[in-house]
Amino acid sequence: MTAILFIVFLVCLVLSFPVAIAMGMAAITPGIVDPTFSADVVYIIRAMVVGIDSTPILAIPLFILSGTIMAQGGISGKLFDVFAYFLGRLTGGLPCAVIVTCLFYGAISGSGPATCAAVGAMTVPLLVSLGYDKAFCSAIVATAGGLGLIIPPSISFVNYALVTGTSVTSLFTAGVLPGCLIALFLMAYCYFYCRSHGEDKEKVAKNCAALHSRSLGRVLKEGFWALLSPVIILGGIYSGIFSPTEAACISVVYAVIVSLFIYRSVNLKRLWSLILESVQSCAPLCALLALATAFSRVLTMLNAPQALAEFISGSIASKVSFLILLNVALLILGMFIDGAPAILILSPLLMPIAANYGIDPVHLGVVIVCNLTIGLASPPFGLNLFVASSTTGSPVMEIGKKVIPFILMFLIALILITFIPQISLCLV
């Protein structure tokens, strides 16, 4: 019966059905083939309702809404000015400032593509005007934009928590050091690239002089409210003042106040259209989550996770071998499938297998999300490549060539994160 379920699922994907519909078709198949099977259509509908009838799921649309409002509010530009003020005069300083901006903006938006689009639209034209290669700059935002999936508050971690029962707060905490480590590796490559290829020192110095002429106090004042956003959200979560879902509510209120009354970059009419835009972005994800819940429950009733765990445990002798195989499989999968459905489908299957090898579920979540983040920027189908291309005007293939060294640096960081669990777990 399990084989029939997966055959139906794969056939639907081959026929270009949406992933959510493919999971729904597969979930109802056992009940149709065997009328005595308890997971009939009524059970599937009930499982879908239960899947989205939870408080933590509210964090997803709310973080999407706050990120959308902040993006419209020009937050990325103000963040970049702050980091460019301190890093701009160093070798590769401005490209490094883009990466740090993505790191901080990811803590506001919680989304990789949103971070890529918002930061890329503002920073790439500036860097190109200063003499940096356009495809190289686009590759920076395509890769560093993925940090939005790892740095809390991450929507990917919320998805993982919803289908595995892992603590959202623990996942958010676990993502901090891996995200910073990856950013450092990406910045290291920017430094060596700029040192070997050279920079237009005159243009860069002129831009930095103009920025410094505004004075540190003014730059910090303009960027203060943007910098304060992740401090309020993450500080409140880690201090126990509010839960991740409550933090999502607060982030929306904060985004509205800052964009509407302080920066005045959004008016009431535009605010309503941003709400509608966020609903349109969130609705497919909620439908996917509902159907993924039904899909995973049917798999559980068929004992598929346990059977797969026993098979892999009997075939793979060591934890190291399993982690290597897991990384390779996820890296390949991430090139062809979006992170959200991959997390919702694979996480319930991988949990019992990882438990057999003594892998902490929080560490497993970090490894899964890091792998799928690499897939966002990996040729030929990485979503961030297309986002960066549409935002900056660089051809996808040119960005794909320039992104390969960044991917290699990302992989080095991934190896450390995978085989040194304390990088993820020491703060948890």
Image (cartoon, helix red, strand yellow):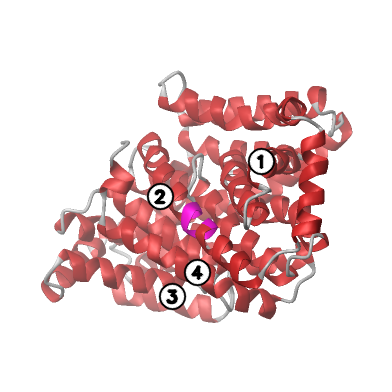
Mark 1 neighbour density, 10 Å: few (under 14) some (14–19) many (20 or more): many
* Sequence-wise first label, 2 or 3: 2
Q: Earlier in the sequence, mark 2 or mark 1?
A: 1
**Mark in front: 2 vs 1:** 2
Residue 28 is situated, as x and y percent measured from the top left of the image, at 42, 64
Residue annotated with mark 4 = 407
Q: Which residue is mark 1?
A: 67
C-alpha span from label 3 to label 1: 29 Å
Q: Which residue is mark 2?
A: 178
Q: Amino acid at mark 4?
A: Ile
Residue displayed at 52% across by 25% down: 246
* 2 or 4: tag closer to the N-terminus: 2
Alpha carbon of mark 2 to alpha carbon of mark 1: how far?
22 Å
Tell me whether the residue at label 2 lies in contact with that at label 4, contact meaning CB atoms closer than 8 angstroms: no
According to the picture, the residue beneath numbered tag 3 turns out to be 332
Residue visible at 50% across and 69% down in the picture: 407
Q: Give the class, few, some or many, for how many residues have Cα within 10 Å of label 4's Cα (few <14, many ≥20).
A: some
The part of the image, by quadrant, that contains residue 330 is bottom left
Residue in the foreground of this view, choosing between 128 and 145: 128
- Residue at left offset 73%, top offset 41%: 81
